Amino acid sequence: MDRFQHLVKTWAVTIFTAPGPLVGEVGFRQKMAIQSWLRLVPCPRVVLLGQHSSLTDFAAGKSHVKVEADIDFTFSGQAMFHGMVQRALRVQSGVVVMIDSELILLPHVSVVLRSLHAVDHDWLLTGLPRTVDDFPYSLRDDWLQTHGVQVEDEKVDAYVKANGNWIIGGVAQFWAWNANRRPLHAGVMPPFVFKQGQHDSWLLAEALTSKYRLVIDGTEALNVFRIVNTFVSTGPVQLVDENEPNR
């Protein structure tokens, strides 16, 4: 089997995140984010690392979503970043993504990942998110605006680029790499708590210093974003029908 055939055979995406409880407004944003990930092609496997019962309730009956709790957590239930990385590195084929649980992905992210997956080099992709206030769309199977009118992904992408803001001094909250046995860095990771401390900056610095992989800034190409406020609601977030064939 040549390299191209191997890449086609192993083209799959596994997404890891450590969400908080999927309740309330924050839970709504996290569910919308997960829904956006499941619209990638091919549909990724989403692994929720956490202990809260709402994660298990959410994943019940969803073949592409599973919950795991076999990493280190604080006494308050917050995931340890080094445990997340160790778990993600156990995936040995395709593309692995580690992402903040509130970040929205649009379908063109699949194109970026597929293009990098075909590169004959080990790589690590990272990206800074935009924040969007007063986001006028909600998500079911597709993006919707007022009165349930469908909106094309390209329009959402353009809205985010026109209205999104960068956080000054912001850190990468999206990581992706081609999965194999090569590590991301050489150093020993300190015991960071996910979403606290400087774990993103540490990982970026270590990856650049170690030179195990080509480190790529995909901020502009990815255009990942976080919603601060949603003023349009068309009902509860629903996942894509899993009986529907991949688009």
Image (cartoon, helix red, strand yellow):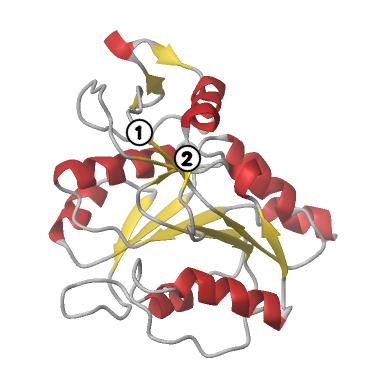
Note whether 46 is above or below 181 in the view shown: above
Horizontal side of 194 relative to 215 (left or right) equals left
Q: Residues within 10 Å of mark 1 (few under 14, many from 20)?
A: some
Instruction: Residue at 14%, 44% (x, y): give it.
Output: 24
Horizontal side of 112 relative to 136 (left or right) equals right
Residue behind mark 1: 133
* Mark 1, secondary structure of its residue: loop
Q: Quadrant of the C terminus?
A: top right
> Mark 2 belongs to which amino acid?
Asn
Task: Tell me if I can see residue 110 in this picture.
Answer: yes
> Mark 1 belongs to which amino acid?
Asp
* Mark 2, secondary structure of its residue: strand
Instruction: Residue at 26%, 66% (x, y): give it.
Output: 50
Residue behind mark 2: 165
Note whether 219 is above or below 66 in the view shown: above
Instruction: Residue at 17%, 62% (x, y): give it.
Output: 52
Q: What's the distance in space between the residues labelled 2 and 1, CA to CA?
A: 9 Å
Task: Tell me if I can see residue 90 in this picture.
Answer: no
Instruction: Residue at 30%, 12% (x, y): give it.
Output: 146
